[in-house]
């Protein structure tokens, strides 16, 4: 299970301001805190900050990479920002993951040359010109199309991360199941392909969002999810993720679980 | 999801003593507390108490049924105790579930007449003369055999509860997966048959057992589990169960989740 820290995202007001103010210390502290919490990769997104978009991404990638040694997930809806991130990326810190392409032809065509040039890993969202399908069948069809497009230009299956997409459960009570079914079907058809998603959208509009996000994390892990973009500074989220890995047979002799316990990472006082 | 309260079990020293001392108040308080916590059925097991086995079960069933209106899961390794429980059971409080038969021929033959006579629901464990299989394939074979034996004497599929069995993850790191695979395979072959299990065995010998039990509850619910024998007085366990039901599409318009939130059942203070 690959944990990708979600917090360096300009959709969050504090982070947007840190980028706009070129606040090196705050960005680097947030990067370090996420890695200390257990993130093995950090998502970086600067697209909501004002100013020159490409300069923002360049500054963010360089600033984060100065502080931590984990690879980055370069996250933007704009191809230009992603390309700038790849251009300035320090490849000594591991392979970059770009987030994302979709089934939209224009978007694919725009980013494919950079994917080929940099040999980066790629997040592919299961949506296209029609929007986000409300059923897993269509999402799986788009996933298959995206896997073909990427493998045709030489991207190995292990570098393809399909995002099954998460739509708030508050808008339809089947939305959790649609994501889960998409994960299972894609993994069944392509066991080598990875599944990644940002989970917290599931709880949008409902109370006690962390509780929903934590339970959905476990349910999606049970379906075969390989990576998640989550808050790695949330101790309970990290504890249940570790516990789920143990229960899913990914922890020889429960040694990771016992080590986490000894480090005090599994214990909570609850009133 | 059917929640079966686990606490009225003579394997627990306090309960054993309550039974031996014919402590009506303590037994009835424990029964009420579990129902207030959300149990929709209570497991009752008196077999570890000293004294006359059948008298103990008779007293326990009558004492519990005087206090609460939920049906009971009559739990014993001894056929005589189960039969006594069925004999004195108040059927106005819903159908009794007996716990359990196994694939052992002698055990099946001994209990089948009572199952036919009382038309009770039945828990069937996926083990036989060879013990507990260490793989899901053999467990599923035993499940299929048990389903055939029970349906042949007229037990409807909906009254058959297959227990996929839970062996501690501390003894083999694949033990969680074996249970999960057994659940999925049995549900795929027989969607009408129910799956029930006691989960807490999974965490035996490891620290922070509640954390493991809670995560395993969610993972097994994701595999299609219908009922679980758990501690319904554990507020976090009940909160995550409610949340998992919502995410699994069993909660129209999230109304159960929102109601639980309004009743303060989802909120915890965590240090």
Image (cartoon, coloured by chain):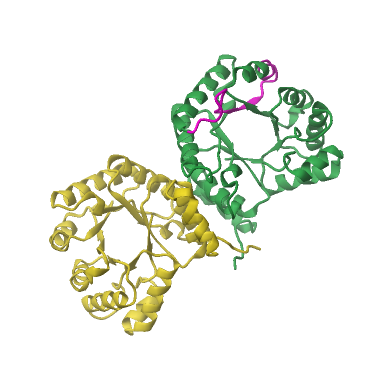
Chain colours: A yellow, B green
Tally of marks: 0
Q: Position of residue B102 (x, y in %)?
A: 60, 25
Residue closest to the eye, A243 or B268: A243
To which quarter of the image does residue A107 belong? bottom left
Q: Is residue B149 above or below residue B261?
A: above
Q: From the viewer's perspective, is A213 left or right of A140?
A: right
Which quadrant of the figure contains the C terminus of chain A? bottom right
* Bounds of the magenta segment: B113-134
Q: Position of residue A268 (x, y in %)?
A: 59, 63
Q: Is residue A26 magenta?
A: no
The residue located at (35%, 70%) in the rendering is A9
Q: Is residue B141 above or below residue B48?
A: above
Q: Is residue B119 magenta?
A: yes
Q: Is residue A135 visible?
A: no
Residue closest to the eye, B122 or B212: B212
Q: Is residue A263 above or below residue B67?
A: below
Q: Is residue B143 visible?
A: yes
Residue closest to the eye, A239 or B85: A239
To which quarter of the image does residue A13 belong? bottom left
The residue located at (17%, 54%) in the rendering is A105
To which quarter of the image does residue A38 belong? bottom left
Q: Is residue B1 above or below residue A152?
A: above
Which quadrant of the figure contains the N terminus of chain A? bottom left
Residue closest to the eye, B238 or A154: A154
Q: Position of residue B36 (x, y in %)?
A: 71, 48
Q: Position of residue A39 (x, y in %)?
A: 39, 65
């Amino acid at each position: 299970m690959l944990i990708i820290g979600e917090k360096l995202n300009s959709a969050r007001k504090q982070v947007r301001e840190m980028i706009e103010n070129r606040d090196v210390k705050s960005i680097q502290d947030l990067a370090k805190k996420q890695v200390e919490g257990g993130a093995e990769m950090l998502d970086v997104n600067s697209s909501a900050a004002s100013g020159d978009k490409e300069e923002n991404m360049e500054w963010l990638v360089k600033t984060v990479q100065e502080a931590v040694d984990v690879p980055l997930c370069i996250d933007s809806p704009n191809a230009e920002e992603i390309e700038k991130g790849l251009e300035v990326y320090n490849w000594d810190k591991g392979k970059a993951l770009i987030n994302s392409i979709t089934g939209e032809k224009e978007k694919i065509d725009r980013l494919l040359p950079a994917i080929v040039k940099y040999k980066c890993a790629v997040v592919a969202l299961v949506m296209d010109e029609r929007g986000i399908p409300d059923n897993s069948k269509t999402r799986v069809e788009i996933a298959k199309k995206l896997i073909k497009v990427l493998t045709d230009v030489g991207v190995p299956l292990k570098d393809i991360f399909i995002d099954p997409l998460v739509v708030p459960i508050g808008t339809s009570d089947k939305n959790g199941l649609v994501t889960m079914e998409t994960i299972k079907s894609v993994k069944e058809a392509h066991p080598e392909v990875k599944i990644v998603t940002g989970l917290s959208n599931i709880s949008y509009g409902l109370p006690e969002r962390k509780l929903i996000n934590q339970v959905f994390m476990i349910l999606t892990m049970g379906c075969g999810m390989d990576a998640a973009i989550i808050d790695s500074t949330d101790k309970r989220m990290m504890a249940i993720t570790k516990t789920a890995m143990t229960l899913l047979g990914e922890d020889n002799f429960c040694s990771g679980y016992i080590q986490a316990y000894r480090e005090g990472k599994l214990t909570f006082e609850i009133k």
